[in-house]
Image (cartoon, coloured by chain):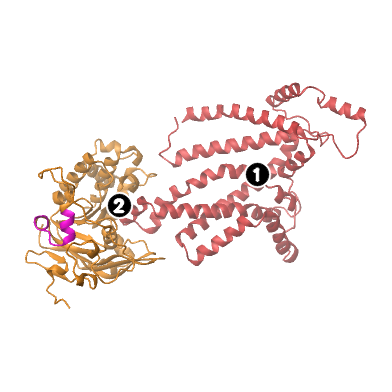
Chain colours: A red, B orange
Amino acid sequence: MTKFIIRRLLSLIPTMFVIVTLSFFLIRFAPGGPFSAEKKVPAQVLQNLMKKYHMDESLGRQYLRYFGEILRGDLGPSFRYKDMTVNALIKQSMPNSMLLGTLSLALAVALGIAVGIVSALKQNKWQDYTAMSLAVVGISVPLFVIGPLLQLVFAMQLKWLPTSGWITDRAGLKTLIMPVITLSFPYFAYIARMSRASILEVLRSDYVRTARAKGLKESTVIGKHVLKGALLPIVSYLGPAFSGIITGSIVVETIFLVPGVGKIFVQSALNRDYTLIMGEVIVYSLILIVMNFVVDIVYGFLDPRIAYK
Amino acid sequence: MTEEVILRVKDLRTYFKTDEGTVKAVDGVSFDLHKGETLGIVGESGSGKSVTNLSIINMIPSPPGKIVGGEVLFMDADLLAMPANKIREIRGNKISMIFQDPMTSLNPFLRISTQMTETIILHQGLGKDEAKAKAIEMLKLAGIPAPEKRIDQYPHQFSGGMRQRVMIAMSLSCNPEILIADEPTSALDVTIQAQILDLMKDLTARLGTAVILITHSLGVVAGMCDTLCVMYAGRVVERGATDAVFADPKHPYTQGLIKSVPRLDVASGNRLSSIRGQPPNVIDLPDCCPFYPRCDKAMDICKRKYPAVSRFDDGRSVACWLYSEEKLP
């Protein structure tokens, strides 16, 4: 097991190397650049800027220089946000996105699995139809519809919650409620559908029939024999879901004015803010890889048939 | 084998509602099982063997299935009329089951010890350690080497034959009155089949357990069973002592089945005999003998009415117009 963990950690290095290299060149080959604004910049100013950010050097040199910097843990200065380093920008926004994402995913997992269990056990009854209709809404209705709808009802009309803002505002933790619900909705819907399907499959399996033939109570059959096998697919979904929910919350962050990483991510791409894009890509891939790694380890504990050597 | 009847199945009917119509998977099955008896149920795929046995312990998946009629009397109590918590006390305890595929019948996520002791703790009220000791003893009886070590392993660490041994040990661990074995050897290779059958025969004889053995194989029935039920399209067409049925099969279907077994004592080179045609589609079957399209001795009446059961002196019963006393209209 330890050997497996070490080997997996070592394999992070080539993966990250490929990701960094590919995205470095891809973003530079995209037309435009950080200084191609609508307003023409005087040639001399542009030249100074290029020199300052080492953009006048050859691409190969720039790449080597950048690589050296990230090895030292320095993601460089932002091209657009003057006087801000990429490290500082990410450090500022990442915790907010992490908090929002973790809460949303936790809510989505808890509710999704609970609803999945109920609809599987009440298959083709009204509980199942209600839950699955809700899930279809969650999957098909985009976040930018759900978010404003919640704002309209709970903030504008009922005046229970603040329209937008973040926990540092005066409204405090209340500001979290609507963004968390909005962000968790599609994930909840997906997890509910997935756990329902997977529980139904396990319920029909031979070993559940054996468990029933042993005279076990239905609650024991479900709790002890069905859930463990049925929830494995959800565990493997959680890896990509976690990284997705952290960086993919741009819509929610914009609607509820959350100072998160999603907004910076999109703006950096539009601005061709090379170092910031790279920084975000690196952080995102690290989260994705680490989460998948964690999922693999957890899988090994849950499924005895998997042995890591 | 004694004369005491421990299980009496009377006119059992289990139907499945499908979009195409009602499937009468089991349609009026009756038989008795005596204490310590081994009863074989044979028939083609889809003849209702497995559904009969799932119906006995009321485990038909519902919907779509439904037991629409009949009685299953176990020690004079009707299992079909029992509330769920009462029948759970019988399942795995008084009546236990072994299924066809040992590769999928054990829970891959739980240790053998967990799966075995849960039954023993539930039905015998033993403590955890006592239950484990009992489980180890059962595994040893079932021929698992080093059971003290193996019991803490997971199913994937066992071969198919070993898993079926575990299933047998598990199903006999509460000393049941009846063991229902649903094609226990169909998924195993031939050499293992013989071992598993011998083990079942040996253990059930020692414990005095009655067995209902569901199988495709007439060879297995001949070697294992005291009595035999031949099923066709959801009904028992012939029932009697195994030796008598093999010596003198009455129903044309039984005759066909026995003729189609390859024999070592008859000169080879001849084409193996077979029953022509296909088993009938049991959806919305009209009132007729379902075997008549494949029967050499079919008569006009066979197409119009299902034959009543005729009984013979040796205890045999056959559902065929050839033996019917009823006046042909």
Residue at the limit of the structure toward the left, as seen here? B313
Verify CB contact (< 8 Å) between mark 2 and mark 1.
no
Give the crowd class for mark 1: few <14, some 14-19, many >=20 residues within 10 Å. Answer: many
Instruction: Residue A112: name its quadrant.
Output: bottom right
Q: Nearer the viewer, residue B134 or B323?
A: B323
Residue at the image position 9 percent from the left and 44 percent from the top: B265
On the rendered structure, is A31 left or right of B310?
A: right
The residue beneath circle 1 is A246
- Can residue B154 be spotted in the picture? no
Identified at 29% across, 69% down, the residue is B81
Task: Please tell me whether residue B316 is drawn above or below residue A111 in the rendered image.
Answer: below
Q: Which residues are magenta?
A: B245-258
Q: Is residue B229 depicted above or below B140 in this figure?
A: below
The circle drawn on residue B119 is 2
Q: Is residue A50 left or right of residue A287?
A: right
Residue B257 in magenta? Answer: yes
Please tell me which residue is depicted at 28% across the width and 55% down the height of the picture. Answer: B45
Q: CA distance from mark 2 to mark 1?
A: 46 Å
Between B13 and A82, the one nearer to me in the picture: B13
Crowd band around label 2 with a 10 angstrom C-alpha radius: few (<14), some (14–19), many (20+): many
The disc at residue A81 is none
Instruction: Report if residue B264 is visible in the image.
Output: yes
Q: Secondary structure at mark 1?
A: helix
Relative vertical location of residue B32 with respect to residue A74 in this rendering, above or below:
below
Q: Amino acid at mark 1?
A: Ile
Amino acid carrying mark 2 in the image: Thr
